[in-house]
Amino acid sequence: MKRSNVLYGADYNPDQWPEEVWDEDVRLMREAGVNIVSLGIFAWSRIQPAEHVWDFAWLDTVIDKLHAGGISVNLATATASPPPWVSATYPETLPVDESGASYWPGSRQHFAPSSPTYRRLAGELVRRLAERYVKHPAVVMWHVGNEFGCHLWMDFSDAARDAYRVWLAKRYGTIDALNAAWGTSFWSQTYGAFHEIFPPRLAPYSHNPSSMLDWRRFTSDMLLECYLAERKILLDAGATQPITTNFMGPFKPADYRRWAPHMDVIADDCYPDPANPHRIRDAAFQRDLIRSLKPGVPWMLWEQATDAVNWRPGNPGKRPGALMAETAQSIARGADGIMFFQWRQSRAGSEKFHSAMLPHAGTSTRTWDAVTELGARLAALGDLPAPGRDAQVALVFDWENWWAVEERDHPTEIDYLALTLEWYGAFHERGIQVDIIAPEDAGAGYDLVIAPVLYLLREEGASAIARFVEDGGTLVTGPFTDIVDEHDQFRSGGFLTLLGDVVGLRYEDFGALAGESTGGSGVGALSADAAQAARAAAARGTVSFSFEGETHAGRLVAETVHTAGATVLGTFETGLQAGSPAITQHRFGAGEAWYAATQPSGDAIGAIVDAVVAASGARSVVADLPAGVEVARRGDLVTLINHGDAPVEVAIDGTDAETGAAVAQVSLESQGVAFVLAPVESAVRSAPLVDAATF
């Protein structure tokens, strides 16, 4: 029987259970097809019950039992939740909120990432674990920390204050350079020395937006420093196994694109909400984002739920078949590892209602049947192809832009992730593969680049985008794009200063719709009917515009832009900008740039996407895709998932990857999944994440 290179397993927390059940755990893991577990993630207090007391005997036993059962170990450094003695002995390790109040123990992640004391204690724990287990044959991977920043988005402690000053001094060199970057002449904020700077603690009103941008950079970097410190200890101890930590998809506090080079393999946690009508789209975006962080390298899904979670206001379970469908989405988009939180459902604690591979109700359950069936199907897949450059379309998603565009005191409030997901969704429902990139990564290999709301634009990113278009690519961007530099300051010369020539426009004003003024000469200059329509549109926060003979709605802004070479494809029909350009197209070099001067709503995005796809030559992975069917390609493996309620048939020539049978079409029941080998010349095989001979 062929063996898949897919890793399959869960978080394993034997420290929550008596030793009597450990042998049963290993036996049932084998029955379910488990070949790897993440071990000891929250076991610090069991390993080190007091500062100078260490207990590894239980961990030795567990690792040896797993190894004897043919199950590999992704060994955690256990630093994610300090035991009570740490905060009792060293209260300076506790994080602080913006008002100066401490976060106390009793939950998890109660440590200040910048605290030298926390880092010293965590480092000693990691060093002892590494020295003891780095050569153990069961240990095939290292799990550093856990979900860095998940609950503690920002720490305002004195440790953070001191580290922030050092970070700023290193970044700017002189206080004068910092003052210039932050524009501190406004509101008498000019600093005389770095020691005058504090974290953005509770203040009467808005903090300096440039300082907030740096504070978010610093916060992400401090979490990354914790990871890197532990990684160095492991490497110094001789670790040759892959080292990484678990991401959380589009997680705002941590710039994962800066983290990715330090991960031997990208790992992610993904929990689609069954109550979210856009859960399929949102989860697909997350998996494409994770794959795109380290192109060409398979990634791992370290956490998902077998059924219901416990931490939402309402926690419905998964519908039958959804576990396979959600897992297939990860495989389709580059994962070579499928894992869950957790193996055995907890009896006590905050997550006792969270589902697990082995439910509290035992093996005579729908959940157990689903996880054992999933294990068997994954094992039948054989070696998976590497996730290559399968996408013709790239979508720009940038953390620094995210931080800056959602800061206070803007013309309108923008939800950057939500807008990005709207554009992504139009390609997803059309079966068009998308990579998620930084602005600097726009370039050869893509036919089409979508860059929504690129408010903060670095010069390197603008240059890459311009070259992409000039060399023959198609760009779609706007609105609220190319407004500020990397310090969140306006550039000299107004807006669209870097991309104006590319899009062929001159930018005059934002034209915010939410709260837009409808009085004064602007409305008075219109006819009575037009003025009434403008007021109604402003009250709704929307505006109408034409495109390809149809009327569509826009929201957030209706920018005042003037053509400087661009062709007008659509104009505003209502509002203060009635008659001015809403959708434009401009030839630049061998390519073209499209610009939307408002955020298209509903069908408008679909209409624009259809037009630019036709212009760029991008195409679906499978033609004539039925509604509700998701498709993705990784090398020569095409995955089809029917998220709809009715059975469907999809025409595709290839070979069933599980059975080896030739197919010309596949039939999919609701939540049905098909893996079809449909070779392409560029497909290459993936190197296993760990040696399959170890399990």
Image (cartoon, rainbow, N blue to C red):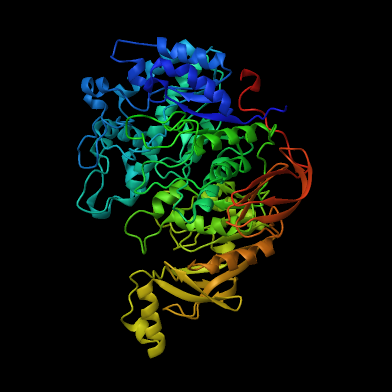
* 117 to the left or right of 287: left
In the rendered image, the vertical position of residue 546 relative to residue 18, given as above or below: below
* Residue 593 left/right relative to 601: right
Q: Position of residue 258 (x, y in %)?
A: 49, 38
Q: Quadrant of residue 620?
A: bottom right
**Picture quarter with the N terminus:** top right
Specify whether 162 is left or right of 3: left
Task: Provide residue 122's location: percent of width, then percent of height.
Answer: 36, 21
Whether residue 34 is visible: no
Residue placed farthest to the bottom in the image?
A: 528
Task: Name the residue at 48% across, 68% down.
Answer: 598
Q: Position of residue 572 (x, y in %)?
A: 49, 77
Residue drawn at x 43%, y 37% as measured from the top left:
355
Q: Quadrant where the C terminus lies?
A: top right
Q: Is residue 55 visible?
A: yes
Residue 683 vertical position relative to residue 142 in the rendered view, above or below: below
